[in-house]
Image: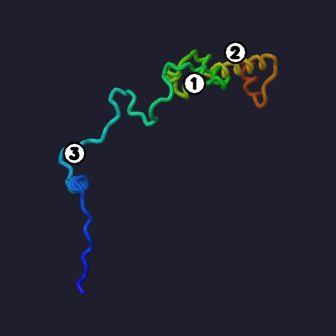
Amino acid sequence: MAKKKPAKAKKTAAGRKAAAKSHKKPSAAARLKPAPRPAANGGPTASTLGRPKVTGDEPLYLLFREDYHARQIFEFLKVRTVRELEEFSAGEILRRLSNPIKATVERIRSSLAERNRCLAGDEEFAVEHKSRPDGK
């Protein structure tokens, strides 16, 4: 008995084109093409976040209507829109928010030291503060 040859699958025109393209080597120009670099002007590069779901002119009070503390921060920074808020980095926001707190704590420490009192573990500061000629 003769062995049967397996039936060949018929190739469509699209299949032949795809097969023909896959056998070609990339041209020299394509192989030497450099990898894309970030923008030289320091501007934004291609974002991987996708398309924004809100506009830059969106009021922050609408986006954060349930978050009272966030709205207080926006008021402190004097920003009203998403675009204005995006100009700040997270570190910059923390620095701006913490500076008044740090200054207030220093005033508290000085005021207590002038009255021969101190915060827990702050005796060294109180003694140094009292020994200064100007008291500050």
Could you tell me which secondary element the residue under label 1 belongs to?
helix
Asked if 4 appears above or below 119 in the picture, the reply is below
Disc 3 and disc 2: Cα gap in Å?
A: 69 Å
* Residue linked to disc 2: 136
The structure residue drawn at horizontal position 42% and vertical position 34%, both measured from the top left corner, is: 47
- 10 Å crowding of disc 2: few (<14), some (14-19), many (20+): few
Could you tell me which secondary element the residue under label 2 belongs to?
loop
Determine whether, in the image, residue 60 is placed left or right of residue 41: right
Mark 3 touching mark 1, by CB under 8 A?
no
> Looking at the picture, how far across and down is residue 10, in whole percent?
25, 62
Residue 30 is tagged as: 3
Which one is closest to the eye, mark 3 or mark 1?
Answer: 3
Determine whether, in the image, residue 128 is placed left or right of residue 32: right
Closer-to-camera residue (14/79): 14
> Looking at the picture, how far across and down is residue 5, in whole percent?
24, 76
> Looking at the picture, how far across and down is residue 51, in whole percent?
45, 32
Seen as rendered, the residue at the extreme right is 116
Seen as rendered, the residue at the extreme left is 28
Q: Quadrant of residue 90?
A: top right
Determine whether, in the image, residue 73 is placed left or right of residue 117: left
Closer-to-camera residue (103/15): 15
Residue 120 is tagged as: none
Which one is closest to the eye, mark 1 or mark 2?
Answer: 1
Marked residue nearer the N-terminal end (3 or 2): 3
Residue 93 is tagged as: 1
- 10 Å crowding of disc 1: few (<14), some (14-19), many (20+): some
Marked residue nearer the N-terminal end (3 or 1): 3
Determine whether, in the image, residue 71 is placed left or right of residue 108: left
Disc 1 and disc 2: Cα gap in Å?
A: 29 Å
Closer-to-camera residue (8/41): 8
